[in-house]
Structures are given as structure tokens and as C-alpha cells.
Image (tube, coloured by chain):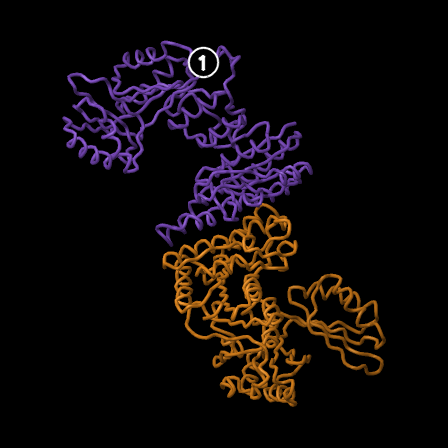
Chain colours: A purple, B orange
Amino acid sequence: MALIVQKYGGTSVGTVERIRAVAEKVKSFRDEGHDLVIVVSAMSGETNRLLGLARDISSEPSSRELDVLVSTGEQVTIALLCMALHELDCDARSYTGSQVRILTDSAHTKARILDISDKPIREDLAKGRVVVVAGFQGVDENGNITTLGRGGSDTTGVALAAALKADECQIYTDVDGVYTTDPRVVPNARRLEKITFEEMLEMASLGSKVLQIRSVEFAGKYNVPLRVLSSFTEGNGTLITTEDIEDMEQPIVSGIAFNRDEAKLTVAGVPDIPGVASRILTPVSDANIEVDMIVQNIGVDNQTDFTFTVHRNEFERARRIVEGVARDIGARAVIADQNICKVSIVGVGMRSHAGVASRMFKSLSSEGINIQMISTSEIKISVVIDEKYLELAVRALHDVFELSKKAEAE
Amino acid sequence: MALIVQKYGGTSVGTVERIRAVAEKVKSFRDEGHDLVIVVSAMSGETNRLLGLARDISSEPSSRELDVLVSTGEQVTIALLCMALHELDCDARSYTGSQVRILTDSAHTKARILDISDKPIREDLAKGRVVVVAGFQGVDENGNITTLGRGGSDTTGVALAAALKADECQIYTDVDGVYTTDPRVVPNARRLEKITFEEMLEMASLGSKVLQIRSVEFAGKYNVPLRVLSSFTEGNGTLITTEDIEDMEQPIVSGIAFNRDEAKLTVAGVPDIPGVASRILTPVSDANIEVDMIVQNIGVDNQTDFTFTVHRNEFERARRIVEGVARDIGARAVIADQNICKVSIVGVGMRSHAGVASRMFKSLSSEGINIQMISTSEIKISVVIDEKYLELAVRALHDVFELSKKAEAE
């Protein structure tokens, strides 16, 4: 018997039938004797419908009123799910963010949780009730309705689990776990039984859209065991947890992430003098353009090349800025390339293993793939390559690190 | 410069375009220097959509969760209306029932208002803001969301006007005021400039569905001047107010109401002994059937006839009950008739004028209309006649009391 927080996303509660199915799943956990707190999103499509109404009225609606508007989406779901639970003779009670009280700061549409009152929830649980909480929303100290930003229901789930010291926070979604890489690219990609918070963060930020990155950080910070699993199929999903230190046999590489949303800008023939990097990047960041990878090699003949990547949506804007800077600093040329992709191998195991990088580079070169940029962190190595090699590279790396085999330690 | 509470119903805010039109109307009042508190309903169709979702899940949904569900309808409207006001550079702020705080009892789906905190609203008004409040909803002392029952937004408007001691409560609807009778029946029916609370109550309860009857009672009790007017056309509507004692020349009859939703049951040949009326009506009321008119004449030959009317929806159920009772008490027969209607003349003026009833009866008889039942109150006389004479009777009475002429005192 455990205290479990379960979060069901918009697709999982997208229709009356699906809400009924969620109620049955919840009831079966309740029948096993668990205490349950259920966090739900708005029915899929509802948030967009509400935002559409706002957009029809105003191109720049007040963020306070936007929160009043979109928070109704989850409020509808909590009521319907409670009704569905009652139909199964399962006692249940709904709470809006304000009723719980999930106290946030006043940053409307992107508020941060400050505090959660667990008293009313604990009282309901003690009475044998399932508690159903509206995700994504809270209330500030003046009683204004706030929202945590899109996808914030995951964060609500994790924050509630942390506040209640729950045994596990289960995130139900439309995929059945975290995979070694995207199964659409590598058909024998394998679902991971376990992954560390750090690995999950690298995977998530690199484009595996399974979980909200903020909720993973939150879970890691408060050490809430987090499990991703499917609403629609049976299975244990993937447990995201702290690194198991006793687990000596853990795989070196846990997964392969990739991203084809970036574009690359190189300022070639830059005078190799102090302050040049900042002269190039400051106007870019002043224009609110986010820069991802940055590579600068040592200079030769008092000249160097400076390369960075931005999101493709910002590419043209960034190029115009950089071309101006290049003239000012007397660089030779700006080389712009949108046909790139980033491929990364991620794994806490690589911390203690030498030779991972060379194995990766060798594998790519044996496929004839030229590496344009390299960047590394403690638990990840990323390369930028020609976009056309994406699938080939991911499959080759998936093979060479034997990711389709179940690791012995699992 | 006045403090005005305006209430806009579901049709008035039924689309984004109409919400924009309401915003413009509100802005124009604001520009005249008035302080404004706006109460809105859910966009038309929204409450039914939400109830439909509930019905798909449960035949008997929890009333607490129903309130959580349907209260989202008004919450959407307050946010959208504020956005529309902001677009017109009109400062505005939305409040849910719970945020205001409109404190109610805990009778979910039909709660009664206990108290309204006017402090936050007054603070906003002092800052020059338009305050937009969700109608129809409140919160109980434990923080549960409650609703006042369908149509309850009128009550919210009146209650707010009473709490704020507003100069006027304006109810915007799809009709442009209260008429002497239904213009579909009498084309030259005239809009009334003024009507008393008592007359309005009689008109409303007799089938003029302009205002929620509860809101009229409330307005009368707290002496809130109430004005009914159209969202879609210009005009002063109808002011509902306390009887103007100085207004000696007020018309004897203000309006004609009618109702064809009733059916008539007569128990004929009832022994004329004490306790018979209650023996007939007790089982009817025990079955939760509402009885409207009751007529019993003096007995002849130790026998009498007992007649009452019920809503047609309850007719068959009432008939079965009464037939059982008739056998038990040895009555001669039960005569049932669904083809009836009730026509009433209403006016505070008839208190001090004799001869109103005879004028009414004479007018009906000169049209060859037989009166089946008569019932009177201080300010109204109702008759039950054959349904087929409804239009004829209403037109005749409208003529004889000269209702299409503007009264001199107005």
C-alpha cells in the first residue's frame, strides 16, 4: 500500500470514454489499497479552443485574464473524472489549484509553485477518498488564478508528490515509456526500465518530448521517483530515479537523442583577439535569440572560426545580425547552413568510461559521415552532422552501443 | 455619475462578436463617468454542452462536481469580456464568484447567497476599473464552488447591486423590456416604462419569462431599482421599482399574462364534509406535484366539486392519484381537462378600483368565452378558459383595459 500521485495528460482524458477508462484504472489502483492523488490536464483540444477565443478578441490578451480563461479547461476535467469515479462507487473529490491551495508567484501564464497545502488532501485520503486535482494551475497570494505554462500539469504532479512525500509520481501519457531512441527512426529501439534524472534531462532537452523538462528537474531536486507510462496499454513504463550507485553494471550509453530544429552559423576568418566571441554573441542575445551549441577552435595565423547554432525559426534573423557584426570586426565570411542536425549519446555511465567519444566518432566515420561540430558535457556527447545522415547516424550509434540489448544490470 | 450593475445573459455574450459589442456598450457607460460592475452568464449553449458531458458520464452526477463543472462557463466569459475591454483601453478586472467572495450556503446547484464582500470590488472601482463578475456562482464557507441554479446570474446582479448599494441594476436580455402582454399575441402590445416589483412578480410567475423570479423578489426586498433592457437595440427598457405612491393616475391594469402549461382536474360530487380538501391534495403534494389554482365552491345537497390545476407534465401522474382518492372518498367522478389556459390581468391599481373584475368578465362573455375557474389576489385576477380562446381573450382584455395607450402618468 503506497501513496501514489498519477498524472493523466490531455490525450488520456480527451473524450468521455477515455475519462471513463482513466476512472477504471484509478479504481483498480484504489482496490489494491493505494492512496491516490490524481492530477489531470484539460481535455485535448480544449486549451487550444480557449486560446483561440482569446486570440479572436485580442492579439495581446492580458496574462491575468488568460489564466482565468484557460484554467477552466482542467476544472472541467476534474469534475468529469470525479463523476466517472462515483459511477464506479469510488469516493472522490475534486480540487482546483486554488482550492488545494497551490500557492504560486504572480508570474501569470508561467508561474512557479511556492508552496502546497497538503492538509485538505490528507484529510480526504484518510477518509478513503481519491483526490482529483486540476493540473497546470495555482493561485497567488492575492487570490489571482495563475497557470504554470503549457504542459505544466506534469509539474503539478511532481510538486504534489514532493509535498505529500508520495512513494511514486506516475505520469500517464500516450507513449509507454522512455526509449533508447525514437522508435520511428530505429525500429528495434528499446524501452528503458530505468533512467537517471540527469539522463532524462539530457534526453528531454534534446528533443525526446515525453516529459516536461521542468517537472524532471523538480523531481530530481526533491528526489521524487517518477514513472512514465501509457494510459492506453499495460506495462511498467520507465522509472526515472536517482543514480543507483551500487549498480556497477549500468550501460555506458542509455539513449540517443536527436534534433533537426537547429541551424548553424559560422563566422569565418575572425581576428583571433580577446573579446571577439562576445562581440559576435552579444547582439544575438540582445535580440532574444537563444543559442545552443558554440564551438571555437584555437586560432591559426591570428585567425579563427566561430560557429554556433540557433533554432531554425530564428535563423534568418540571426544571420542578418551576424553579417553586420562580421563586417564590423573584419571577418572573412559568414557561412550559414540550415541542413544540419544534432545527434547526441547520453548516459551517466560515460563519466567513468574513457573511449566513448572515440567509439562514437569511429562509428560515424565508418559510415562516411563527416562531423561538423562536437560538444560534450559530463554525461553526453553531441555532434552536428549533415541532416541527410540523421537516420543513418542514429541507427549506427544505436548498434555500436548495443542499445537494443537489455542491459544486464536491469 | 452613478454606480451601475449591469448583467448580460448568455445570448448577449454568445459569440466573440457579441462579447465585443457588450464591451463597447460598457465602455460607453464608463466614458459617461459611471462606475460599473458587470455580471455575465456563460456563452449561450456552453452550460448545456457541459451538462451534456456530465450526462454522458453519469445519470446522477454529484451536485458538488456539477457545480465545479458548470461554473467554468461564466469563468470563460469574464476573462473574454475583460480582454475585449482592454482592447478598448478600458481597464477591467475579472472575478469568479469565489474570488469576489459571494458566500452561499452549501446547497449545490441551488445555493442561496448569504453574504457578499464588497471590499475588493470597491477598491477596483476606486482605481477606475470596470469590475467583471461571473454570474450564477458562489462559494460556501468550506471553499466549495456552488451555483445558484439556472438563470441565477440575474440574482447575482441584483445581490451585487444590493451589497454595493448601486443606483440601478440593469438586466440586459434579448427583449427590450416588459410588455403589457406578449406581442406575438397582441401586435400592439406596449412596452411599459415602469412596473412595480409586485406586478412584475405576478407577470413573471404567470409566464412572462423576462426575469428570474428570484431576482425580482430579491430586488424588491432590498429595494434595488431594476431595469430590463435589450443588449441589441437602444432604448430605456422597463424600470421595475417600488410603487410610486404619488403617482395617482397609474393605470388600473398594467399587463396581461397567460399560461398554457397547465391542466385541470375536477373531483365532482365530493361529500361536503370537513377534511375532504386535504384528503384530495395531500397525496398529490406527497408525490411532489405542484398545484397552482385551487377552487372549491359552496356545497349544495351535501355535495361539492373540487378543482385544481397542475403542470401538464405532471397531469397523468396527478390524475392517477386523484382517481384513487376519488374512489376512497366516494366522489362521483374525476373530470380531467388538458385543453385549458390561464389568463390573468395584473395591476397594483386594481387594489383601489372596484369593478375591474366585472369589466374583465363582461368583456370575456361578450366574446362568447365561458369562464371555467376564477381566482384572485390583491393585484391580479386569473381565469381559466378553454385553450382555443387564449388569443381572443388576451386581445379583448388588452383592448378593454386600453393597454396599447400610453398611460398619462408615465
Residue projecting furthest to the front: A274
Q: Can you give x and y, in whole percent of width and height, for residue A120 in the image?
A: 63, 41
Residue at 40% from the left image edge and 57% from the top image edge: B16
Q: Quadrant of residue A291?
A: top left
B245 relative to B122 in the view: left or right: right
Q: Quadrant of residue B258?
A: bottom right
Q: Is residue A221 above or below residue B75?
A: above
B348 relative to A335 in the view: left or right: right
Residue named by callout 1: A251
Residue in front for this viewpoint, A157 or A238: A157
Residue in front for this viewpoint, A395 or B137: B137
Q: Is residue A118 above or below residue A370?
A: below
Q: Is residue A410 above or below residue B347?
A: above
Q: Is residue B246 above or below residue B320?
A: below
Q: Residues within 10 Å of mark 1 (few under 14, many from 20)?
A: many
Q: Can you give x and y, in whole percent of width and height, for residue A296 in the image?
A: 25, 21
Element marked by disc 1: loop
Q: Quadrant of residue B324?
A: bottom right
B410 relative to B382 in the view: left or right: left
Disc 1 sits on a residue from what chain?
A
Q: How many marks?
A: 1
Q: Can you give x and y, in whole percent of width and height, for residue B177 in the image?
A: 49, 74
Q: Can you give x and y, in whole percent of width and height, for residue A35 in the image?
A: 64, 32
Query: Please, what is the three-letter code of the amino acid marked with disc 1?
Result: Pro
Residue in front for this viewpoint, B253 or B101: B101
| Quarter in which the N terminus of chain A is drawn | top right
